Image (cartoon, helix red, strand yellow):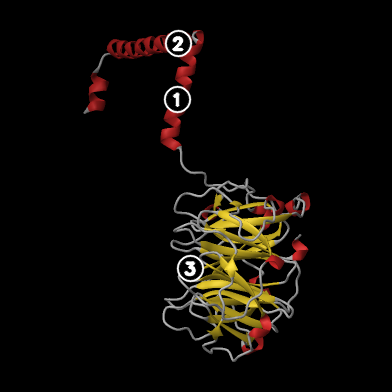
């Protein structure tokens, strides 16, 4: 019908309609030209228009960056451009990580108050402290039994009191997944080395290090875990040393690594110690002849004990007492194999750090509590310790 109506129109009327349309378009164009000329003639008006258009574009199209800037393969190796320096890496309870030069922290006397290792929010505290070099690689083990890998120089450097970078911005962690252990590894290809893993329920496992070579961005399974268990400690070993487990309630057990057969990466492991009640593992060490075991408690007490006081037992036993726990000492937070020339770093829940010479810490018997190593205020506890080897100095 519409087509027929157009056909019935006279030519003069059709011409008039088309002319009217052209005149309307001309009028609109002249108004637009006048408006654009006014913008070009007024700098402030021009800036306002640009601002409005940019805001409109942002509101319509803006979203989070989807690309990730990485070093292209086949180009310059970043490791070759970075000095191999000694560093300390701190990692907090709420997942913030940073690296600082190791000489940032000077050695102090036993019983001192320490210096601030970083600025933390009120509820946060430094949980892990690792000393290594910028050219080493770090393996990050999680409470869920997964492992991630990163070059040490990829961890953003920060000032001594800086909070650091959120680990979730560096690693692809799952919800409720937390880093429980991070260890530095060198770049050698020694296939005779193993990773020894321990869980809070006293399970241990030994796996060849070569099974952890190709770790992708999503990480790998490091150990199979039962629902109520978590991974708490990992060591690199040659597979022939004695293992010393220490519990929160002051128990310990020493057994030879050969009692643990090598297992696949996803295996669950075997029992290392039989725990009593709600006790749990706080540390695992590999023994060295001529060294002592340093034990540190929540309230800053500690001692060295000759390793020969810990007899070798069969794996999976109940173990023997390694520390006398009292209200003034609190429970055990960590234990390390040390030599006199080593140093130890101790950090409390306020982020305060103290660095001590091992030779200044007295040697006591196995069933004792030791001396005060770090002053602690009310409701402030020691949360982490880390050994500094003589070759790191």
Q: Secondary structure at mark 2?
A: helix
Q: Residue at x 62, y 89 (%)?
A: 259
Q: How many marks?
A: 3
Q: CA distance from mark 1 to mark 2?
A: 18 Å
Q: Quadrant of the N terminus?
A: top left
Mark 3 and mark 1 in contact (Cβ < 8 Å)?
no
Q: In x, y percent, where is residue 353?
A: 59, 55
Front residue of this view, candidates 219 and 163: 163
Between circles 1 and 3, the one closer to the viewer is: 3
Q: Residue at x 75, y 71 (%)?
A: 189
| Tag 1 residue | 53
Front residue of this view, candidates 253 and 270: 253
Q: CA distance from mark 2 to mark 3?
A: 85 Å
Answer with mark 2 or mark 3, whichever residue precedes in sequence. 2
> In terms of image quadrants, where is residue 255?
bottom right
| Tag 3 residue | 328
Answer with mark 1 or mark 2, whichever residue precedes in sequence. 2
Can residue 73 be seen here? yes
Mark 3 and mark 2 in contact (Cβ < 8 Å)?
no
Q: Which label sits on residue 112?
A: none
Q: Is residue 279 left or right of residue 136?
A: left
Q: In x, y percent, where is residue 65?
A: 52, 44
Q: Badge 2, how many Cα within 10 Å: few under 14, some, many 20+? A: few
Q: Secondary structure at mark 3?
A: loop
Q: Which label sits on residue 33?
A: 2
């Amino acid at each position: 019908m519409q087509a027929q109506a157009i056909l019935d129109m006279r030519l003069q009327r059709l011409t008039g309609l088309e002319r009217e349309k052209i005149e309307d378009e001309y009028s609109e164009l002249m108004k637009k030209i006048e408006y654009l000329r006014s913008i070009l003639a007024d700098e402030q008006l021009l800036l306002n228009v640009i601002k409005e258009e940019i805001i409109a574009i942002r509101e319509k199209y803006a979203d989070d960056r989807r690309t990730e800037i990485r070093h292209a393969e086949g180009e310059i190796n970043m490791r070759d451009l970075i000095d191999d320096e000694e560093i300390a890496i701190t990692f907090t309870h709420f997942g913030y990580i940073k690296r600082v030069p190791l000489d940032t922290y000077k050695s102090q006397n036993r019983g001192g108050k320490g210096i601030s290792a970083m600025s933390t929010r009120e509820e946060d505290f430094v949980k892990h402290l690792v000393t290594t070099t910028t050219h080493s690689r770090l393996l990050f083990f999680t409470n869920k039994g997964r492992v991630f890998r990163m070059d040490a120089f990829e961890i953003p450097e920060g000032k001594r009191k800086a909070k650091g970078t959120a680990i979730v911005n560096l690693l692809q962690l799952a919800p409720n997944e937390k880093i429980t252990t991070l260890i530095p590894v060198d770049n050698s290809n020694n296939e005779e080395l193993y990773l020894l893993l321990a869980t809070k329920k006293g399970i241990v496992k030994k796996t060849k290090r070569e099974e952890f070579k190709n770790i992708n961005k999503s990480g790998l399974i490091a150990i199979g875990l039962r629902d109520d268990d978590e991974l708490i400690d990992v060591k690199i070993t040659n597979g022939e040393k004695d293992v010393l487990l220490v519990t929160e309630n002051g128990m310990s057990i020493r057994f030879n690594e050969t009692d643990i057969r090598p297992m696949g990466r996803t295996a669950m492991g075997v029992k290392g110690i039989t725990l009593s009640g709600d006790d749990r593992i706080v540390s695992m060490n590999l023994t060295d002849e001529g060294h002592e075991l340093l034990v540190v408690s929540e309230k800053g007490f500690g001692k060295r004990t000759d390793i020969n006081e810990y007899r070798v037992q069969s794996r999976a036993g109940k173990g023997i007492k390694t520390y006398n726990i009292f209200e003034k000492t609190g429970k055990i937070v960590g234990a390390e194999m040390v030599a006199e020339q080593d140093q130890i770093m101790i950090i409390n829940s306020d982020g305060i750090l103290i660095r001590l010479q091992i030779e200044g810490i007295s040697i006591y018997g196995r069933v004792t509590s030791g001396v005060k190593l770090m002053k602690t205020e009310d409701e402030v506890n020691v949360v982490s310790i880390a050994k500094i080897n003589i070759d790191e100095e």
